[in-house]
Image (cartoon, rainbow, N blue to C red):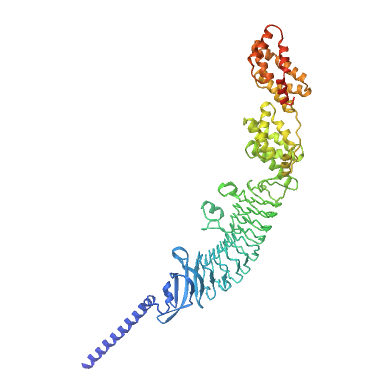
Amino acid sequence: MKTIEMREYMIKFFMKQVWYIFVTTIVMLVLFPLMSITADASDSEWLSDYQYSVRGNSVVLTKYTGAGGDLVIPGSAEINGNIYQVVINAQGSGENAFFPEDNISSLCFGYGCKAESLNAFVFLKENLTSLDLANLDTSEVTNFNAAFARLSSITEIKNLNQINTKSATKMTEMFGDDDKLTSIDLSSFDTENVTDMSWMFKGCSSLEQIDVSGFNTANVENMCSMFEDCSSLKNLDISNFNTEKLNDYQGGYNSVERVHHNCDFDGITHMFSGCRSLESLNLGDFHTENIGFFMGMFRGCSSLRTLDVSSFDMREAISVQNMFYGCSSLESLDLSGWDMRNCTDLEDGSRDSKNMLYRCYNLKTIDTPTNLPKEGILLENGKVYTDEAGTIYTTLPTNCSSSIRLFHNPTIAGIRNFVTRLYQVGLEREPEEEGLNNWTNQLISGEKNAVDIVQGVLCSPEYLNKGKSNSYMVNDCYRAMLNRSADHSGWNDWVTRLDAGMSINAIFAGFVGSQEFINLCSQYNINPGSFPITEERDKNAGVTMFVSRLYTKALGRNYDIAGLNDWCGRINANPSRDNIMNVATNGFFHSSEFLNKDLNNTEFVKVLYRTYLGREYDRAGLSDWVNQLNRGEKTRDQVIEGFAYSQEFSNIMASYGL
């Protein structure tokens, strides 16, 4: 009995010991890691400047909270006597920023320091002046987005070639807006797994040299703005780029669907925009079969002299807005391999492709694309191109199954610009294509000259129907023919002449031989021509003003053009005083119009005062002349003769050069 009791006691005691050991083990396994996380970091005091966690054999740093200055991130940390590898896990900007404050001036790493994510690692650290990447293990980093972006005080990233990028998939904005960097050697970068290089070097405005010769871009889908605003970059060799997977699909949408779903336009938009020092670029092997949007791809590449885009597959192209905008040094462009049948952007004002070639000032030859569905892609504003047959083009030809080589024709361009300018000055609008072509062809053939076109516009029904006053017409003539506003004395003189009855043709004749008009025409490669006077009223301003004065003083009305030309012609043919007297007497005072007024002697003499003396009567004179007429001592013709040979009338005639 005692043996049995002893056995039961031993079994119970053994079970208690086993339970104690089991419970103790569970407690140690569960609580020890938690105790380690919250343990006093007295062994590695620098950890107090970070938010971190312990994960296995690693201390994972997620945020720096220290005072800044010169910073070294060690490769290991000791906690409670245990050694852990330091791992950096940078997860973005803003609230997730690894460095939330811009307070570090230099940064380097201890041996063995490892990174698992560098997303926006030192993003926007403007006070950082030194960055040394030696010792940093990045072999497992997949996300390099904005890792070293917007470091406005960094002129060099030290030991960049030691970065291991074999796991990298994202490099968006990796060095974006590092505007003090002058050179970057990335020849050792392994980019085999990278899918996104958009904005990678955007805004590196001081970058003069960049080596991407080692890039494997076989999996890259997005190069949007990759080199945008690298304004100091003169040479760029990307001949090794494999672009077969480039596309601008987003959310599964193809190019057409993206327009309707209001998606961003990635792919290769703005890829080289703003590279204003770049002189040549060979994209002869670029694949663009999956690209629909080419907006701003070369915009502002003002030094670009040679550009090979001949292999571009444009069958999916929807928008080419601003594609070559500002390529002002480009002299030739071969688009002969471009099939643009789907360029529907021409029908949508919000994404206007018409300015694809805007400000390509020096473009001399263009091999045009084929199958362009709608007219509208403008050639450089004011420039005119012709094919070998001499056909004029101001837009790229549409619906052509084969390419046409166009040549810039400066002579025709000058002519069209001259005509356009006249429309703008006189008619206050742009010319319609039919009118522009009509005037241009007449100038090219020599059928018309510059002054003929001036007359054609400023004497057109459209212009005359505007009802402009003489003062405005004179101003328009100055602007049209002398390319300036009228000076006051000249303006006053011509307005006086027009008010007196001269036509606008007199101004044309007066300006056509001026050096100002000749110089203006030479600017547009156009013959100024000559302008013969055909109307008598335009031959002698003094005669015209004198005759016009006879109408208003003698007949009390304005001239009629036929009568004005008739009387001016008679005086122009014989400007003697006797003939002038004969015109005044027989032409006006003996006219039925004057005689039908049936004026009494007093009113008759008053008219003579106004006509021959240019003033109102004096009482004594009026009384004397009227009394002589009333007493029959003089006839009316004798009284007219008395006025006509007076000194006052001689002075009036002299003022008109008669």
The part of the image, by quadrant, that contains residue 285 is bottom right
Q: Tag count in the figure?
A: 0
Front-most of 609 and 161?
609
Q: Position of residue 189 (x, y in %)?
A: 59, 70
Figure check: 65 above or below 303: below
> Can you name the residue that lies furthest to the front here?
620
> Can you name the residue that lies furthest to the left here?
1
Q: Position of residue 432 (x, y in %)?
A: 65, 39
The part of the image, by quadrant, that contains residue 64 is bottom left
In the image, what residue occupies the spot 69% across and 57% down? 305
Answer yes or no: is residue 560 visible: no
Figure check: 36 above or below 4: above
Figure check: 417 above or below 3: above
In the image, what residue occupies the spot 63% across and 46% down? 376
Q: Position of residue 242 (x, y in %)?
A: 62, 65
Quadrant of the image containing the C terminus: top right
Figure check: 538 above or below 262: above
The part of the image, by quadrant, that contains residue 612 is top right
Q: Position of residue 446 (x, y in %)?
A: 77, 38
Answer yes or no: is residue 255 visible: yes
Quadrant of the image containing the N terminus: bottom left
